[in-house]
Image (tube, rainbow, N blue to C red):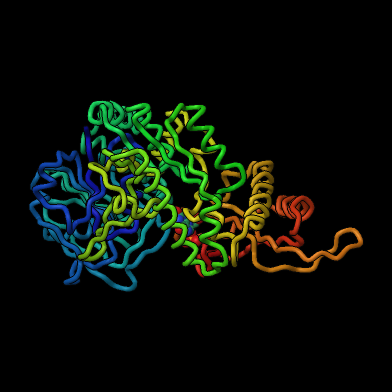
């Protein structure tokens, strides 16, 4: 299989680069510069290597460097931003820095004719974000592009197949970025582009069919896209030997538990155990108002319920998890690379004894998981399900949680979602939901005074959920949602819209 190595020097776009490469049907994997050796690269059989950007300056003693032997492997290298400066530094060029040489944002790029810039106009827009620049190109390199402030915006040594670009071809603001990456992959690395997420998933199904023959596999199914796709993929491989445990903690959205059960058990014939543990969770949560305590209680209780079910099944040979690639990627930031912990079913392997752990989606990005899910026949609602926190509605009911409050919130939330759907805006905000605030306010209904809850509506637009903008939903959608919620949901007298972005607020209220 053709593979490209994205060697991460701490750049913020490391995953984006890999995704852009995969978009061109070439498999790409991200490895941190400080935890991936030259011999691993040699053994890896890579068609090409991309050095990512990074926040440092190459002369800074703390800055990330790599064994120069990487440039003698005969594998084409493309350095991006810091990666290009590092390449220049490693091959005898000079990198300089000056306040007035920095460029940030969309910049006019002028390119020469070259295989890297095939099908590019002479002038186009690129995305720049740098202070240092290559002031003297290394011997054997030619300058391929420049901008007004940057004398070497791209360089090449065709003999050694070494290339550097100061700008970021992976971001969409670079008008021909996709074409440049395409040119590197196909003109320089001579890739064929025969990788496909579904083919890869089909191969995994075949592999699991053989490797897991006769073994029982246990999976915690949440109804989220990752565990759903992992379940379907394994179901295709081993059928009834896959046992899915779906813990319904009673804090799901309206109708969601039945929907998950029907989809998996009835539509796909998956061996599914649904545990209706709502009462158990509710009694543990009684009177608890502190958000962190709520989360802890739910996390612990979830593990306990799952453990009890696992015990009933007997010895578990294989535990499966829906971990995806971004959860696995180590970051090349700093010397102590940490693997991000997977928090959806956090802690399960510690309490269940099993012989083997499998993660069928660990090589896939979220969009690839979705496309595999769609091809496996997963309903659109599940494939495009918006993120839903593990603790569920518990973190959307401010203050203590009661059965009545859960019902009120489920109804209000369902109305809001219906109104967003009616306006065909489901794919506009990346997440939207209702919150039951702990505030009662005075209202009037007919001639009567009411004193009901305040429901808050929240909708956010975001790429990564690390930062988020509140979504400018049309007023008439908000109006209809508000009017329906106050009319149709008993004990709600007021609806407000949350207009805080993240930061300083978070997406969830708790
Ligand atoms: P915050 O509130 O931190 O949320 O801005 C960012 C994203 O993460 C989701 N979220 C969670 N997901 N377990 C999860 O699996 C959790 O405990 C949790 N808390 C927040 C949130 O819905 C949003 O998409």
Name the one closer to the observer, 97 or 264: 264
Q: Is residue 198 above or below residue 291?
A: above
Q: Is residue 352 visible?
A: yes
Q: Is residue 494 above or below residue 203?
A: below
**In screen coordinates, is 451 left or right of 507?**
right
Q: Is residue 125 visible?
A: no
The residue shown at (40%, 39%) is: 369
Identify the residue at the far bottom of this view.
Answer: 99
Name the one closer to the observer, 9 or 232: 232
Q: Quadrant of residue 120?
A: top left
The residue shown at (68%, 41%) is: 422
The residue shown at (54%, 59%) is: 283
Name the one closer to the observer, 158 or 385: 385
The residue shown at (71%, 54%) is: 478
Location of the N terminus by quadrant is top left
Query: Where residue 435 appears, x then y in whole percent?
Result: 62, 59
Name the one closer to the observer, 352 or 14: 352
Query: Where residue 500 appears, x then y in whole percent?
Result: 59, 65
Query: Where residue 475 appears, x then y in whole percent?
Result: 72, 54
Q: Quadrant of residue 201?
A: top left
Q: Is residue 213 above or below residue 297?
A: above
Query: Where residue 298 appears, x then y in whole percent?
Result: 47, 57
How many labels sit on residues? 0
């Amino acid at each position: 299989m053709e593979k490209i190595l994205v060697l991460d020097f701490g750049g913020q776009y490391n995953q984006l680069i890999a995704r852009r490469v995969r978009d061109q049907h070439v498999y790409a994997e991200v490895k941190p510069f400080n935890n991936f050796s030259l011999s691993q690269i040699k053994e890896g059989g890579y068609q090409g290597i991309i050095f990512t950007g990074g926040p440092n300056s190459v002369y800074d003693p703390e800055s990330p460097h790599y064994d120069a032997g990487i440039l003698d492997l005969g594998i084409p290298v493309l350095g991006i931003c810091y990666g290009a400066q590092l390449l220049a530094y490693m091959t005898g060029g000079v990198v300089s820095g000056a306040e007035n040489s920095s460029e940030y944002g969309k910049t006019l790029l002028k390119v020469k004719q070259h295989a890297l810039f095939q099908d590019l106009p002479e002038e186009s827009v690129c995305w720049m974000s740098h202070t240092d620049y290559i002031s003297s190109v290394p011997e054997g390199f030619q300058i391929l592009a420049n901008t007004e402030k940057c004398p070497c915006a791209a360089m090449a040594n065709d003999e050694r197949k070494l290339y550097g670009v100061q700008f970021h071809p992976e971001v969409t603001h670079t008008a021909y970025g996709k074409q440049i990456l395409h040119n590197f992959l196909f003109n320089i690395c001579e890739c064929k582009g025969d990788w496909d997420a579904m083919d890869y998933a089909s191969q995994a199904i075949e592999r699991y069919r053989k490797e897991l023959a006769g073994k029982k596999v246990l999976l915690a199914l949440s109804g989220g896209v990752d565990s759903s796709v992992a379940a379907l993929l394994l179901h295709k491989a081993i059928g009834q030997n896959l046992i899915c445990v779906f813990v319904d903690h009673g804090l799901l959205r309206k109708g969601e538990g039945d929907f998950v059960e029907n989809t998996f058990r009835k539509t796909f014939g998956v061996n599914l155990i649904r545990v209706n543990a709502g009462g158990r969770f509710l009694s543990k949560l009684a009177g608890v108002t502190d958000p962190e305590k709520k989360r802890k209680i739910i996390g612990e209780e979830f593990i306990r319920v799952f453990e009890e079910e696992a015990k009933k099944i007997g010895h578990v040979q294989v535990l499966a998890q829906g971990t995806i690639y971004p959860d696995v990627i180590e970051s090349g930031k700093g010397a102590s690379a940490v693997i991000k912990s997977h928090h959806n079913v956090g802690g399960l392997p510690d309490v269940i004894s099993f012989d083997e752990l499998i993660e069928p989606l660990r090589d896939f990005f979220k969009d690839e998981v979705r496309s595999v899910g769609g091809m496996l026949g997963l309903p659109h609602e599940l494939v495009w399900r918006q993120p839903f926190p593990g603790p569920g509605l518990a973190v959307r009911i401010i203050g203590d949680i009661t059965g009545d409050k859960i019902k009120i919130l489920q109804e209000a939330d369902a109305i809001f979602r219906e109104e967003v759907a009616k306006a065909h805006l489901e794919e506009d905000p990346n997440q939207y939901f209702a919150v039951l605030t702990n505030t009662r306010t005075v209202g009037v209904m007919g001639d009567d005074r009411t004193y009901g809850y305040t429901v808050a509506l929240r909708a956010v637009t975001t790429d990564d959920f690390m930062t988020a903008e509140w979504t400018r939903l049309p007023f008439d959608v908000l109006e209809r949602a508000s009017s329906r919620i106050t009319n149709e949901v008993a004990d709600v007298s007021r609806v407000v819209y949350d207009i805080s972005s993240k930061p300083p607020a978070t997406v969830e209220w708790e």
